[in-house]
Amino acid sequence: LATWLATWQAVFVFPVLWTAWEFLLGRQGIGGIAYSQMDFPASTQIAALVGAPGVTFLVSLAASALAVAWHLRNRPSEALPAVAIPLVLCTATIVWGALVLARPLAGPVVRVGLAATDETVRFFRTERAEEALPVVAAYARRVGDLAARGAEVVVLPEKFVGVTPAYADAVRDALADAARTHRVWVVAGLNRIEGSVRRNVALVVAPDGRAVLEYGKVHMVPGWEDGYTPGRAPAPIPSQGTWGVAICRDLMYPDVARANALAGVRLLLVPAWDFVRDGWVTSRIAAMRAVENGLAVARPAQQGLVVATDEHGRLLAEVATGDAPEVLLLVDVPLGSGATPYTRMGDWFGWLTTALSAGIVVSAVASARG
């Protein structure tokens, strides 16, 4: 191993180790350097083949190439491949990504309304009808405003109000009236408070006023949502099989978006709640899930960013809720093309780097003892 590491081939050691590390962290909902590239979409289309770990590998490969080439600067015959091979791999990936992005999107377009405000966030845990119902009424008015502008579906933020059994029917009726009056789908994030039971849900109401789905968030925020009852994915919307629902932190993990794509979902509607400073990174992580699975994503977050992205992770719209008393955004969102190679094959590349990392560590230990 020591001999091997002294050659240009050492350029692959750091990318393998770092990719495996971030892959394992990602399975715990922790972000990584792959998401830093989301505003350069030509470099991230590789995720449709191998997931976010593929982007991490290429970013760390470029850094490793410079370090190894500098170390071998007095041995040009070995330094040259340390730069040339990573350069070819990275360039080929970017060129391929650019070609993917150059193709026109062929999917049908859905006019999505996104509404959020930071003014009433404090009522997310209210248990009083006199506080909750005015918040719901204000969001019902926003549904009407967006429907009047042509929205087919309106998505509201995560846990925008607390709801107890005492007035749950009144909340549902208000949202149903808005959907029925304006002939629009509504996806509303609610904080269900039912005695000792807590549920973070997205209620989906059809244009005829029927509540057709109540999806429960799968991945909770540690500490913040301890004691909440998790739900299950996927959640395709009945009679709208290409639309699905997830909630905020669900997209910090790859499993929920992938499950939806496998179920035929091509547009993911995601009530969300950021924590102001993390709005950029959480929205870009959601965009990575879009690339991985051929999904469009519409994500209104209170105390963060109201965002929509296409299946390639490109921003269609982005507004910060801190910039206005309320955000009402209308976006034409093309449906994604659906399940990608990554969707079908899963995290094989991440597990491959994990296995290779284990081999590198074992070999290093054996070499040191020898």
Image (tube, helix red, strand yellow):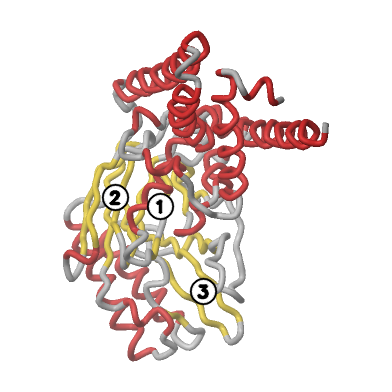
Q: Please tell me whether residue 47 is drawn above or below residue 180 in the rendered image.
A: above
Question: Mark 2 and mark 1: span between their CA atoms?
Answer: 9 Å
Residue 10: x percent and y percent? Answer: 59, 24
Q: Residue tagged by mark 2?
A: 112
Closest to the observer, 160 or 84: 84
Dot 2 falls on a residue whose secondary structure is strand
| Marks 1 & 3, CB-CB < 8 Å contact | no
Q: Position of residue 141 (x, y in %)?
A: 23, 70
At 69% from the left edge and 26% from the top edge, which residue is drawn? 2
Quadrant of the rendering where the N terminus is positioned: top right
Residue 275, located in which quarter of the rendered image? bottom left
User: Of marks 2 and 1, which one's residue comes earlier in the chain?
Assistant: 2
Callout 2, which amino acid?
Val
Residue 210 left/right relative to 320: right
Q: Which mark is residue 224?
A: 3
Q: Which residue has dot 1 on it?
A: 269
Q: Secondary structure at mark 1?
A: strand
The relative height of residue 151 versus residue 122 in the rendered view (above or below) is above
- Vertical relation: 232 (above or below) 367: below
